[in-house]
Image (spheres, grey):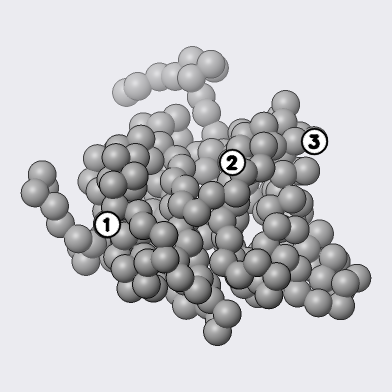
Amino acid sequence: EKHYTDSQVKGVSTGTTIIAAVFDGGVVIGSDSRASIGGEYVSSKTINKVIQVHDRIFCCMAGSLADAQAVIKTAKFHLSFHSVQMGDLPLVMAAASVLKELCYKNKEELQAGFMTAGWDRKKGPQVYVVSLGGMLVSQSVTIGGSGSTYIYGYVDAKYKPNMTRGECLQFATNALALAMGRDNVSGGVAHLVVVTEKGVEHVVIPGDKLPKFNDE
């Protein structure tokens, strides 16, 4: 039996691979479905880390699962209130800014990072990254979590601006499959969401249906 010291006991983490990418007319955002404790023990294989915060705005989370869930719950409340005040749907940038403020104000306590992706009438498809300390960056493609270290080369080589919906969905699926094949705390199913002006589409790919590569 393995015993942990107090310094080794850690909360539930999303021990994870998350990705978001802009394509011609929309965004794809997705993740694996595992949660881990201490980077070793997989506590859940069915966590959905792609969370809808408003009609066409989604977030992915990495880091402490409790911290991430608390921040997103608060952000959803702020966005709903903001939407009622404005009498219109919130901008993707507004959602990212709410997350940024929450992360920055609580940076000493929080251990969670986020990516926000969505579509709005003002700027169309967008992806934003909010770091652990509350830094906000706009990017056309971004990856995060423990599994992301294995796929930076793939993402740099294969991502292209103005991809079609199908090309971008396949790119994100391949990236998640590659990371899940290498990272011991990434795995389960791939949750993907496609957001365009027309609406939202959820895609769930079981682990046995993910693309296979030569090393497997």
Q: Are marks 3 and 2 in contact (CB under 8 Å)?
A: no
Amino acid, disc 2: Gly
Q: Mark 2 or mark 1, which has the lower sequence index?
A: 2
Q: Secondary structure at mark 2?
A: strand
* Relative image position of residue 10 (x, y in whole percent): 52, 28
Mark 3 closeness class: few <14, some 14–19, many ≥20 residues within 10 Å? few
Say if 174 sits above or below 27 in the image. Answer: above
Mark toward the viewer: 2 or 1: 1
Q: Secondary structure at mark 1?
A: helix
* Relative image position of residue 123 (x, y in whole percent): 65, 67
Q: Alpha carbon of mark 1 to alpha carbon of mark 3: how far? A: 36 Å
Q: Which residue lies under the disc numbered 2?
A: 113
Q: Which residue lies under the disc numbered 1?
A: 174
Please report the residue visible at 40 percent of the width from the left and 32 percent of the height from the top: 39
Considering every residue shown, the one lying at the far bottom of the view is 198
Mark toward the viewer: 1 or 3: 1
Q: Mark 3 or mark 2, which has the lower sequence index?
A: 3
Q: Is residue 31 visible?
A: yes
Say if 155 sits above or below 26 in the image. Answer: above
Mark number, residue 105: 3
Amino acid, disc 1: Asn
Q: Alpha carbon of mark 2 to alpha carbon of mark 1: how far? A: 23 Å
Q: Find residue 160 and report its image quarter.
A: bottom left
> Is 60 positioned to the left or the right of 16 in the image?
right
Q: Are marks 2 and 1 in contact (CB under 8 Å)?
A: no
Counting every numbered tag in the picture gives: 3
* Relative image position of residue 212 (x, y in whole percent): 15, 57
Please report the residue visible at 59 percent of the width from the left and 41 percent of the height from the top: 113
Q: Secondary structure at mark 3?
A: helix
**Residue in the foreground of this view, choosing between 209 and 199:** 199
Tell me the quadrant of the picture where the N terminus can be found: top left
Q: Alpha carbon of mark 3 to alpha carbon of mark 2: how far? A: 14 Å
